[in-house]
């Protein structure tokens, strides 16, 4: 089973008995919402599903109260969730109730999808046309694109990242909680190490204090050299992200471009020395 399936299996066990979910345990709720987003639901769909799972047999009014999603929005979400096989809608004594599919069903469905894709992979390869020679560009946009980029990066198997950043620019895309509790957590779990060149600031120095526990080594550059965009070099790719450019993240897939940026990183790294304090 893939790591992707294993992560969902873990959260399925947390979900199995709705009564066990503590509505005030926000960390678990965030983990469950992210697992359901990995399954293919959006955030509101995930919240409604979790509320339904927690309540067992629920009305629309119950779901609105528990999930925090507007009642008028829930009606359209229920149609989508029912069509996707995530919930069942039943009638009892002229009242409508919603029942969530058990998480084990969702896990099995996800595994079945993976197996169908894997079985069809040779056919996909036959249809695939080669792109233009040289560099390839991949675009991610906004918060969802930012999260998708990190999922792709963490699945790439590359064990070293080179990062140039001001530090705070990451927070333009997602919360600090998401960075700490998902990106860094997964990074540590996979034994990925990173080196980081970061603009000197109080915020940067607080980040550096956590270098050892977060599998990272950082070096400071003088604040007179602003770094408004984030650059990340990994393998044969360079990712460039900036909230000032319509929250766009661009990945350049090119061995030559990656080598050039890697060389520039190493020149700066050696030039600033071990400036950690």
Image (spheres, rainbow, N blue to C red):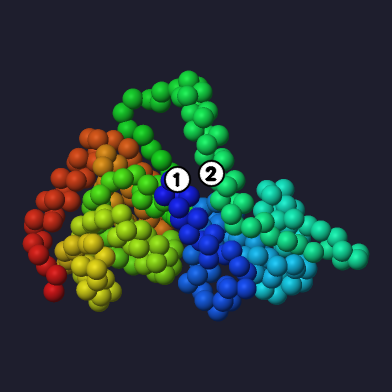
Task: Describe residue 58's horizontal placement relative to residue 262 as left or right.
Answer: right
Q: Nearer the viewer, residue 235 or 133?
A: 235
Q: Quadrant of residue 195?
A: bottom left
State the residue at coordinates (73%, 61%).
Answer: 99
Q: Secondary structure at mark 2?
A: helix
Neighbour class for label 1 at 10 Å: few (<14), some, many (≥20)? few
In which quadrant will I find the N terminus?
A: top left
Q: What's the mark number on residue 111?
A: 2
User: Where 178 sits versus 133, above or below?
Assistant: below
How far across and down, in percent of the image, does residue 12 sit?
A: 54, 59
How far across and down, in percent of the image, does residue 91 sit?
A: 85, 60
How far across and down, in percent of the image, does residue 220 sit?
A: 17, 66
Q: What's the mark number on residue 1?
A: 1
Asked if marks 2 and 1 touch (Cβ < 8 Å), the reply is: yes
Task: Describe residue 139's horizontal placement relative to residue 224 as left or right.
Answer: right
Q: Residue furthest right?
A: 94
Q: Secondary structure at mark 1?
A: loop
Q: Nearer the viewer, residue 115 or 163?
A: 115
Report the Cα–Cα distance between label 2 and label 1: 8 Å
């Amino acid at each position: 089973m893939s790591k992707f399936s294993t992560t969902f299996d873990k959260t399925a066990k947390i979900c199995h008995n709705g009564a066990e979910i503590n509505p005030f345990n926000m960390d678990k709720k965030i983990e469950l919402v992210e697992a359901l987003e990995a399954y293919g639901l959006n955030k509101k769909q995930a919240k409604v599903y979790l509320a339904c799972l927690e309540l067992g047999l629920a009305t629309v009014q119950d779901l609105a109260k528990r999930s925090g999603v507007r009642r008028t929005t829930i009606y359209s979400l229920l149609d989508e969730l029912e069509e996707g096989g995530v919930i069942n809608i039943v009638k009892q004594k002229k009242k409508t109730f919603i029942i969530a599919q058990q998480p084990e069903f969702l896990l099995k469905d996800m595994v079945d999808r993976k197996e169908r894709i894997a079985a069809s992979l040779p056919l996909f390869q036959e249809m695939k046309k080669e792109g233009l020679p040289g560099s390839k560009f991949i675009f991610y946009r906004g918060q969802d694109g930012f999260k998708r980029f990190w999922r792709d990066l963490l699945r790439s198997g590359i064990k070293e990242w080179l990062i140039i950043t001001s530090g705070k620019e990451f927070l333009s895309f997602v919360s600090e909680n998401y960075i700490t509790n998902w990106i860094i957590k997964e990074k540590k779990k996979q034994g990925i190490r990173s080196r980081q060149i970061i603009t000197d600031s109080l915020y940067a120095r607080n980040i550096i204090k956590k270098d050892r526990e977060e599998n990272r080594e950082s070096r400071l550059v003088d604040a007179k050299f602003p770094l408004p965009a984030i650059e990340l070099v990994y393998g044969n790719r360079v990712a460039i992200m900036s909230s000032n450019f319509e929250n766009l993240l661009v990945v350049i897939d090119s061995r030559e471009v990656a080598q050039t940026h890697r060389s520039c990183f190493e020149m700066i790294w050696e030039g600033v020395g071990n400036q950690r304090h």
